[in-house]
Every structure is written in C-alpha cells, then in structure tokens.
Image: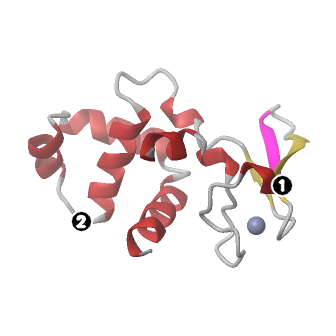
Amino acid sequence: MEKQEFTNSRNLCWNQTCPEYGKINPNNIRKYGHTNKATPRVQCKTCKKVFVETIGTIFYGLQHSEKDVLECFALLAERNSLAAIHRLKGIKEETVVDWLLKAKNQIEQIEAVLLAKNTR
Ligand SMILES: [Zn+2]
C-alpha cells in the first residue's frame, strides 16, 4: 500500500499551501506540457501550480527499491545518522550519500511530504 502511494508520488501537489498538498490524487493532477528540456510537467487543478514531473526520476537505475530509498530518506529526516541507517537497513553509507546527491534538488520536497505523512 505504502509503496503504491510512493510509486504514484508524481500524482500529488507539491504546493504546501494547497489543500491537495501531499495527497495522492491522480484526478487532481493533469499533464501540462513539457519544459524546454522535454521534462514532462503536471498541473494541480486546485491551486493551478505547475510542477516538473521528475519526482520519480531519482529512482531510475538504482539497485534498491523506491521504498528502500524513501525509507532511508525518512530515517535521515528523523535525524538518524548514515551509520544508523546502515545498521537498520543494511544499506551502505556511500549508497545513501549517492542517492542524496541524485535527489539534492528534490530532497526538501520529499522530506516535506514524508514529514507531512508522519504527522498526520
Ligand atoms: Zn495544488
């Protein structure tokens, strides 16, 4: 269930002031053309904000599942150390650092969503 939600993470609104923020609601998000780099864009029908549909792309070509990656990010967001993550998840510290580098433009958004989920 959780994984399904994350898999569809591009179908949510990233605008923190929007009522649909952090909710998985594909009906609320519509395709909205492309950037000049051909990255697909989507628009939230509620707040009319446009987002680049790249939130799922950090997972491409990784050795671990999207769920593992997001769980590690969630652990980091809860102020766990890389050593603690290695102990808990059995994933090497340098692997997590590599994900962080890939995700650096999106990590704040991912953290915001994970933390929003946790406090619900
Ligand atoms: Zn919105």
Q: Amino acid at mark 2?
A: Arg
- Residue linked to disc 1: 43
- Residue linked to disc 2: 79
15 sits to left or right of 38: left
State the SS at label 2.
Answer: loop
Residue at image coords 44%, 74%: 120
Q: Quadrant of ligand 1?
A: bottom right
State the SS at label 1.
Answer: strand
Q: Which part of the image, by quadrant, shows the N terminus?
A: top left
Residue 41 is a magenta residue: yes
Where does the image place residue 39, in percent across and percent down from the top left? 77, 35
Task: Looking at the picture, tell me which residue is in the foreground, 41 or 47.
Answer: 47
Q: Residue furthest bottom?
A: 17
Q: Nearer the viewer, mark 1 or mark 2?
A: 1
Q: Residue furthest left?
A: 87
CB contact under 8 Å: marks 1 and 2:
no
85 sits to left or right of 52: left
Tell me if the residue at label 1 has its CB under 8 Å from ligand 1. Answer: no
Asked if 48 appears above or below 29 in the picture, the reply is below
Where does the image place residue 42, in percent across and percent down from the top left? 81, 48
Magenta-tinted stretch: 39-43
Task: Looking at the picture, tell me which residue is in the foreground, 70 or 102.
Answer: 70
Q: Amino acid at mark 1?
A: Gln
